[in-house]
Every structure is written in C-alpha cells, then in structure tokens.
Amino acid sequence: MDSPPSPSPARWFKALRRTRLGEPCLKTYPLECVDLLQRARVAFQAGRTIEESFRLAQLEAVVQMLEEHECDFVDALGRDLHKPRFETVVSELILVKNEALHAINNLKKWMQPFHVERNLSTTLDGCLVVSEPLGVVLIIGTWCSPVQMCLVPLVGAIAAGNCAIISPSQYTAHTAELLHRLMPFYLDNECFHVILVATNDLPEVVELHFDHVFFTGNREEGSRIAQAAARTLTPVTLILGGKNPCYVDQHCDISITAQRIAWARFHNAGQSLVAPDYILCHVDVKARLVQALKCCLMQFYGSDPRESRSFGRMVNLEIFNRARDILWRSGKVAVGGQVIEAEKYIAPTILTEVVETDPIMQQNVFGPVLPFLAVNDVDEAIAFIKKQEKPLCVYAYSTNSKVISRLMSETSSGSFCSNDSVLQSLMVALPFGGVGASGVGCYHGRYSFDTFSHRKSCLLRGTRFECVTYLRYPPYEDRNLSLMTWASTLSQRSQGWCQIL
C-alpha cells in the first residue's frame, strides 16, 4: 500500500512554525481560506483522492497520528477543559481510532457499486448505484468534544474520497492549534487542511462554496451556518444540541440508574451535546434517586469534586457565567451548587423543585447541572416530551419493557437509548444525528461514508430490443399506446408502464 504523500522540506518547517502548544491561537484569514479551498479543489479535480489505496493510507495516517501523539492530545484537552486523561483517551482518541479502523476494514465493500433488483425489461441491462465523492467538504467541530467532533466526520470524508477543510472551535484553542500543527505531518498537504476561524467568521467561510458542510454545535450557530450554506445551495449536515429528556420510571434499578445518569451528565463537567439535560422522574422514586445520585457523586469525585482529578472545568468564562446564572435562577439546589469563577469551576449540581418555566428548562446549559421534574406516570412524561422541540436524544430507565417501547415509539428524537445514556451516539454501527430542531443528517461508520457521497443512479443499456422500444417514439399512435398500456399490466408487482421504454 502506498504511503501518504510526504510534505516538502519547506512545508515541514512551515507546518512546524504554524503553532506551538501554549501560544496564542493563530487565525486563518479569509484570503488564506480561499487559497486552501482552491488547492483542495485542484487536488480533487485531479483525481488525487479517488483510489482506494490513497484513502486507506490517509485513514491509517489518522490512526498513526493519534497513537504517536496521545500525550499531546491529553495535554491539550487538559489545558482547554481540564479533561482527565481517562476521558480524553476513551471518549476522544479511542472513538476516532475505532471509526478509522472500521472504515479501513470495510472500505472496499463500501466503494463497490450497489446493484438494484432487476426486472423483465432490465434483465440484460446494468442497474446500479455508484457512490462518488462530493468534492471539498468543510467540517466545523464543536468545543465540547473537539477531537471527536472534528476527526470522526473527517474519517467519513476521507473514506468517501473527498478533500476536507477542518475548522476546530476557537474555544478549545490548544486542541485546535495541535490539530493545525500535526495534520500536515500526517495527511496529504493538498487535500486536507485545518483552519483557525472565529465563530462569527464561519458564515463567511461557508459562503466560499464547499460541496458539503458538516456542523456540530448549538442551534443558533447552526442556523447561521445553514443560512450561509443556503446562499450557495450547499448541502449541510447539522448535529445540534438541545434539551435531552431522561425519564426514570418507578420500576427501575435505582442504584444502576443513578450511576449511569451521573456518569453521562457530569462527564466532561456536563459539557456535552448528548448528555441527559433533565430528569422526568416518577414521583414515587424521586427522593430515592436524588439520594442515590448524591452517593454516586461522592463515589465518583469524593467529598470535594474540586480536588478530584476526574472532574473537569468550564471551557471559558462565557460558558461558566451562563451556566452559573441559569443555575442560580432555577429550582432548589439539592446537591452541589458551589462555584469558583477564577477556576471556571461549577460543582456537580442537582436541582429539585424545578418547573417548566425556569431558565434551565428554557435554555441549553453546557455544565454539570441536572434539574429534576416530577411526573406521575409515563403518560405525563411522554406528553411533556412531545410538547418540546424534537431533541437529539431521549433516554428512558425502566425494567418494564412496555414503558420502554412506549417512550421509543411515542416520542420523536434523533436517537433513543434505554437503561443507559450517551452510548448510542458512539457506536459505529448506528447512525447518529438529529431530527427537526436537533439537526439534519447523520454520521458514524457507513452512514458517514454515505453522508459524504453522492449516490449516482446508473443504467447501462445496450442497443438491443429496439423492436420494442420503438413504441415510445413519435408520431404517437393509439395502437402503440394500447400496446404499452397492455404491457404495463403484465407485471403483477406493478413495475410501472415506463418499464417498456
């Protein structure tokens, strides 16, 4: 297998000079973006990404980069989010490597044309669907999972044969700089680029006209990206945050439920698009669940989570202040509630006596705060969820399979998981994406490949049977129409009158 094209010596030194970990975040200016887009488009049009060997080499290079620089990624995410090494390795690096290895193992199969079912009129023809790359795509990552949200879509873009420009979030500056510095050493320097662009400047970049834009983030930014993309008729995939509900039934294992909810909500200090945002708890088990969660937090982070090496921090003061203000204006603190602005620290917090009109139920909160709302039964929980906009995830905890089935079938969401949280968003075999207000499109595994591919329908015909197809030609006669109408009735499966054409 061919190795990835190596940068020239001059470009090696240029890449090395771009950023060094710890320096202020550099900025990619609009003219540079135009130049990078043009270089990528020239490379794509030259067919550089078409061959399977090229795609495999780039995917293997992604894995190599993560393996050789694991410590650098741990350090960068520690600086940006105070993210524990365990969380970085498991939820960022291993996840991306699994995606890349899955793509490597399945790429040949994914690239094969898909033959559709033949019928009488196409027995001697070729009817197939060919997956062809879209071109140059833009991947805009979010700050709450900056490696995962940049590189998992990149794996799909590479597998599908595209060139790609990645825009990591400015909020996680050290991670963005690290990607900016490392990628030229591993991936093809003409096909793949990292740009450092402020959030407010992203719509301007999108308007440069890419062949697809993949965005993860909040709804407000996603809306601006979609509007900018619409001006150039650029298709988009939007993975958008929202209010993910979690119903806890009276029939559930309280201890296991508390552990799994606490892990999902307070992982990465609550900064996640897929964590449970609020608990719809059956009134009969509310007190027990709150107490079980309190015990879990003590077990996970000790008596003072601030001293725990397993608990993160807010990414910046803007996010910190927003979460703190919403916390102070909602419900009653049952557990936690401590904040330290100088450290961007918010303790794992559980709120009770929350009502639907509280700010925490009206706004997205990226932080370690979990509000409780009491419900009397599953019907009330379903009605509450259906009143809201469609979320990215719905979670349900119950040992009653009928309750789980009802939550799954009677609510609409991007994904659903019973008796656990978050995991459905990480699996390479499952598509993950939003619906309605939580986004459009999906990714992971084969679904990423399809997202970054155009499925081209192809009919390969010969010149035989003209004695039959001549019936479609003018001048139109009633006799020919009668023959075609009669032919369309021959198929018991209603293949359609146009098959005779």
Image (cartoon, rainbow, N blue to C red):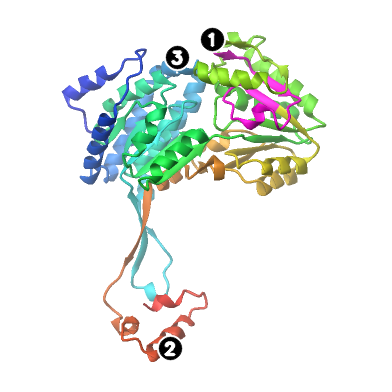
Residue 307's x, y, as percent?
59, 8
Quadrant in the picture for residue 170: top left
Q: What crowding class fits label 3: few (fewer than 14 Cα within 10 Å), some (14-19), or many (20 or more)?
A: some
In primary-sequence order, the first of circles 2 and 1 is: 1
Q: Residue at x 44, y 45 (%)?
A: 446
- Amino acid of disc 2: Ser
The answer to whether marks 2 and 1 mark residues whose Cβ atoms lie closer than 8 Å is: no
Residue 367's x, y, as percent?
58, 22
- Mark 1 secondary-structure assignment: helix
- Quadrant in the picture for the N terminus: top left
**Residue hosting label 1:** 343
Q: What crowding class fits label 1: few (fewer than 14 Cα within 10 Å), some (14-19), or many (20 or more)?
A: few
**Residue hosting label 3:** 79
Query: Residue extending furthest bottom?
Result: 479
Q: Residue at x 35, y 14 (%)?
A: 24
Left or right of residue 55, residue 140 in this image: right
Left or right of residue 206, residue 11 in this image: left
- Mark 2 secondary-structure assignment: helix
Residue 29's x, y, as percent?
29, 27
Residue 164's x, y, as percent?
32, 37
Give the magenta-colored segment's residue range. 342-371
- Quadrant in the picture for the C terminus: bottom left
User: Which residue is at the front of the view, 22 or 207?
Assistant: 207
Mark 3 to mark 2 CA distance (whole Å) = 76 Å
**Residue hosting label 2:** 482
User: Which residue is at the front of the view, 127 or 348?
Assistant: 348
433 lies above or below 169: below
